[in-house]
Image (tube, rainbow, N blue to C red):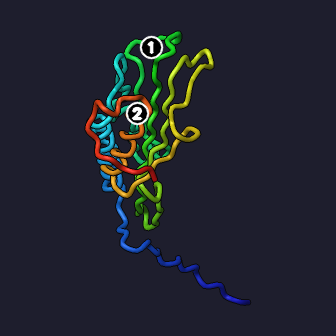
Amino acid sequence: MKQQSAAVPAPVVLPAGAMPMDRPDFTAYVKACIKEVVSLLREQIAVPAGHEWKLASLALLLKRDDPIRSTMHGAAVQIGRVWPDERDPKQYMIDIHYYWQERILLENGKSQTIGKPRHQVSLWCEKGRPLWGKLQNLLPEEAPLVLCADAIPELAQIVAQTVNRATGQEHNKQVSPATLQ
C-alpha cells in the first residue's frame, strides 16, 4: 500500500514591497485611512448652501467592531439638504464611497490580500427631486464615477475638485488642479 505524505502548505508569496499586517495593525490602518479621507474631503469640498455633511460616527460606520469587514464595500459619506424636501428641484445628493488601498492581512498563519489596488472612491453627484424621478447626474460620466489615486491626499483633491465643479462651487474652496484618472 502506498503511503501518503502529509500535505505541506505552500509558502506565502507577498507582492513586492508589501508587508503583512496582523488584525490590530490592519484595523488601525483602515481607521486611519477613513479618518484621513473624511477630514480632507470636509476641508476641500464646498458644501452648497442649505446642505450639510451626513456622516455616521466612526463607531456606527465600523459595524460590529470589525472595520475591515464593515468597510470592504466602501465607507460611505454623503452631502444632502439640512432639512430634506422631496419637492425641491435644486437639492443635491452627493454620495461618496471610499475604498482603502489593499494590504495583506496575516491571520492564523494565512495571508489574505484585502482592498482595492489603489485608494478609490465611487462618486454619485445628483441634483433634483429624488422621489419624483427628476434626478440629474452632474458628473462628466455615467454614475458612479470611479476615481483612484495612490495616496489619500491626491484622491481627496480629485474628488473635491470633481464635486465642486459638479455643484458649481469650485470658486468657494481653494483646491489645486488635479486630473481625473
Which of these two is toward me, 44 or 6?
A: 44
Q: Residue at x 51, y 15 (%)?
A: 89
Q: Residue furthest right?
A: 1
- What is the distance, in whole Å, between disc 1 and disc 2 at their CAs? 16 Å
Q: Residue at x 40, y 33 (%)?
A: 77
Percent of width and height locating residue 56: 37, 29
Percent of width and height locating residue 1: 73, 90
Count all numbered tags in the image, as a single digit.
2
Question: What's under tag 1, amino acid-wise?
Answer: Pro
Q: Is residue 145 above or below residue 18?
A: above
> Disc 1 marks which residue?
84
Quadrant of the image occupied by residue 36: top left
Q: Is residue 181 above or below residue 83?
A: below
Circle 2 — which element? strand
Quadrant of the image occupied by residue 43: top left
> Disc 2 marks which residue?
77
